């Protein structure tokens, strides 16, 4: 692909608030829910733990409420660090994701940690769909769904999230993909017309059929006479 000219490039833009409510933000929602639950539990134990468990608060000289409180605090710190780390990694990953459109194919590349690449030729693209939910419109983003003729979930196409100026991107990609396919279809039609076009008109064919027996009659007559003379030599 290095020698080919890139006609158009899409680079998704990371926005935490937008992605949080999208399918890709499921992990963020889950982690944040756990963090909120740990915060509420920690506050509740700090305020009311000793009053609710006065009889069982001390076991062998150990305050169980304090132990439980520290467990919640440690868990809260761990999930908070995980949440921040996932957020930073996701924002960095977006900088290494690109969708490059060439003359004849689309190439997806993710070169952040685990390298991934995928190529879809325009001739295999069945449909290009623009999709915008209410949340997409509010945040100014959109989604492109590229469907192919391939079967199977891993090879059935591509979904491109978090695209700014989605209307402009859709028009350019649609024009690029289908103009290429129209050009290929015209070339195929020209080739088929050349292969199926008659080399001679019906009148020329009739004339050729009429002339061939006349042209070959003397030669066929000479060969017949020679064969006949040769056969006479063998007669005793």
Image (cartoon, helix red, strand yellow):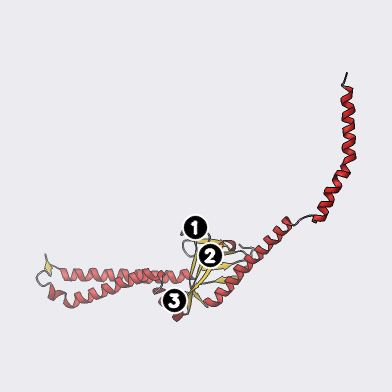
Q: On the rendered structure, is 53 left or right of 77?
A: left
* Residue occupying the point 59% across, 64% down: 122
Q: On the rendered structure, is 193 left or right of 215?
A: left
Residue 200 visible (yes or no): no
Question: Which residue position holds label 1?
Answer: 151
Question: Which residue position holds label 2?
Answer: 108
Task: Label 3, secondary structure: give it.
Answer: loop
| Most distant residue in the left direction | 55
Q: On the rendered structure, is 39 left or right of 150?
A: left
Question: Which residue position holds label 3?
Answer: 133
Q: Residues within 10 Å of mark 3 (few under 14, many from 20)?
A: few
Picture coordinates of residue 175 (x, y %)? 60, 71
- Within the image, what quadrant is residue 177 found in? bottom right
Task: Label 2, secondary structure: give it.
Answer: strand
Q: Quadrant of the N terminus?
A: bottom right
Please say if the residues under marks 2 and 3 sit with CB atoms less than 8 Å apart. no
Q: Earlier in the sequence, mark 2 or mark 3?
A: 2
């Amino acid at each position: 692909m290095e020698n080919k000219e890139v006609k158009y490039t899409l680079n998704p833009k990371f926005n935490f608030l937008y992605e949080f409510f999208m399918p890709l933000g499921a992990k963020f929602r889950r982690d944040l829910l756990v963090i909120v639950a740990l915060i509420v539990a920690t506050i509740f134990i700090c305020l009311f733990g000793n009053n609710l468990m006065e009889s069982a608060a001390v076991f062998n000289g150990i305050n169980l409420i304090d132990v439980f409180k520290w467990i919640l605090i440690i868990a809260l710190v761990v999930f908070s660090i995980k949440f921040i780390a996932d957020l930073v990694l996701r924002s960095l990953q977006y900088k290494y994701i690109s969708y490059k459109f060439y003359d004849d194919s689309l190439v997806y590349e993710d070169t952040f940690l685990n390298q991934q690449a995928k190529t879809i030729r325009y001739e295999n693209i069945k449909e290009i769909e623009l999709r915008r939910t209410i949340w997409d419109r509010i945040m100014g983003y959109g989604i492109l769904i590229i469907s192919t003729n391939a079967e199977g979930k891993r090879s059935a196409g591509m979904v491109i999230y978090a695209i700014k100026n989605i209307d402009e991107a859709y028009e350019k990609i649609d024009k690029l993909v289908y103009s290429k396919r129209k050009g290929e279809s015209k070339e195929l039609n020209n080739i088929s017309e050349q292969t199926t076009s008659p080399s001679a008109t019906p009148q020329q064919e009739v004339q050729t059929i009429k002339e061939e027996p006349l042209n070959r009659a003397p030669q066929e007559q000479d060969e017949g006479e020679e064969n006949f003379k040769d056969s006479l030599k063998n007669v005793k």
